[in-house]
Amino acid sequence: MLIKRRKSRVVKVGGVLIGANNPIVIQSMTKTKTADIEKTICQINDLRSVGCQIVRLAIKDFDDAKALKQIKKHAVLPLVADIHFDWRLAIAAIENGADKIRLNPGNIHREIYIRQVISALKSAKIPLRIGLNSGSVKDVPGAGLSMADKLTKAALGYLKLIEGLKFKDIVISLKANNVLDTVEAYKKIAKLCDYPLHLGVTATGAPYQGVIKSSIALGALLLDGIGDTIRVSLTDAPRQEVRAAKAILESLGQRNFGVQLISCPTCGRCQVDLVNIVKKLEALLTEEKQNLSQRHLKVALMGCVVNGPGEAKEADIGVAFGKGEGLFFSKGKPVKKISVKECIPFLLKEINKA
Ligand code: SF4
């Protein structure tokens, strides 16, 4: 099945293109105090190493804004300055080299301030994200409006003002804290403009719940062709956000990050410890992910002969396990029997060879 992407204009953040038919971009956010330059650079570079493409930083005060200049010298990703309440922080962030500014219409809404930010964005030739969250649209007027309507109405009001200033270098996000409102809001705004959309669910809860909520919401939207960039917000280390985002895009066939593992859930027919074999191989592949990112391979690990040979044949390489050993398949053909003990080093060698 081919996903037909919604038509959107293209926005450039640093060297990364968002929108139209460009690959869907993965974003995350640092969790350090931005003014702690060393820690922030370290986290950004770690995010880059796991596949993040754009990073957002909280700009809480002028020390944070000034720190952007040093961070930019050493960090390897485009930097988005996340601004709330004080428009002057946006100006300072732009002066210190931000590649994009995120404003929340819920807390910076006076036209006189927005005008000055837009003027600075124009001079620096960098884009703006209009980033709404459900928590900041409580005061949008209109009796009986749903959360999705409130988010859409607030975004359209802000857009009208900014387009009136002849600025269209814009990305939009409408994040609610639950799947249904998030999906509804993005579906509404997707029909009303052609700006690229940054997808996310906000305040998702504990990591396991967060991954599930984000996967459902982002998956539903991406399947409909909506979404040009994503962030999986998690109460967890930022690299876990990137890991989840990659898995979502890979599952939908939108990006390919290297080796994909296919494994069965196991049942009473399984005669090996498949759960641990898969965990160990996955951990080793994650460690080597950077080296293996160009290996677009499917690797199947199956617990028995019921579905095992079929799935192993479908994959580029695979093993259908029996009692204490497995039959190794390469390009659909059975090749040789391998013992459980040797299967992980053997598979790693084969993956590296393929
Ligand atoms: S492949 Fe075999 S072990 Fe795995 S779930 Fe299916 S029947 Fe069970």
Image (cartoon, helix red, strand yellow):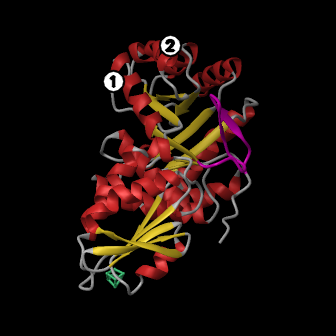
- Name the residue located 29 percent from the left edge and 56 percent from the top edge: 280
Task: Check disc 2 and report the residue beneath it.
Answer: 69
Callout count:
2
Is 324 placed above or below 276 here?
A: below
Secondary element at image label 1: loop
Quadrant of ligand 1: it is bottom left
| Amino acid type, label 2 | Lys
- Name the residue located 46 percent from the left edge and 22 percent from the top edge: 86
- Name the residue located 29 percent from the left edge and 69 percent from the top edge: 339
Q: Is residue 85 left or right of residue 253?
A: left
Between 82 and 19, the one lying in front of the other is 19
Q: How far is mark 2 from mark 1, CA to CA? A: 15 Å
Between 250 and 262, the one lying in front of the other is 262
| Amino acid type, label 1 | Lys
Can residue 143 be seen from the camera position used here? Answer: no
The CB of the residue at mark 2 lies under 8 Å from ligand 1: no
- Name the residue located 48 percent from the left edge and 22 percent from the top edge: 75
User: Which contiguous range is marked in magenta?
Assistant: 8-24
Question: Which disc is residue 172 wearing?
Answer: none
Between 343 and 75, the one lying in front of the other is 343
Q: Does the magenta stretch include residue 303?
A: no
Question: Which disc is residue 33 wearing?
Answer: 1
The C terminus lies in quadrant: bottom right
Can residue 8 be seen from the camera position used here? Answer: yes
Dot 1: few (<14), some (14–19), or many (≥20) neighbours within 10 Å? some
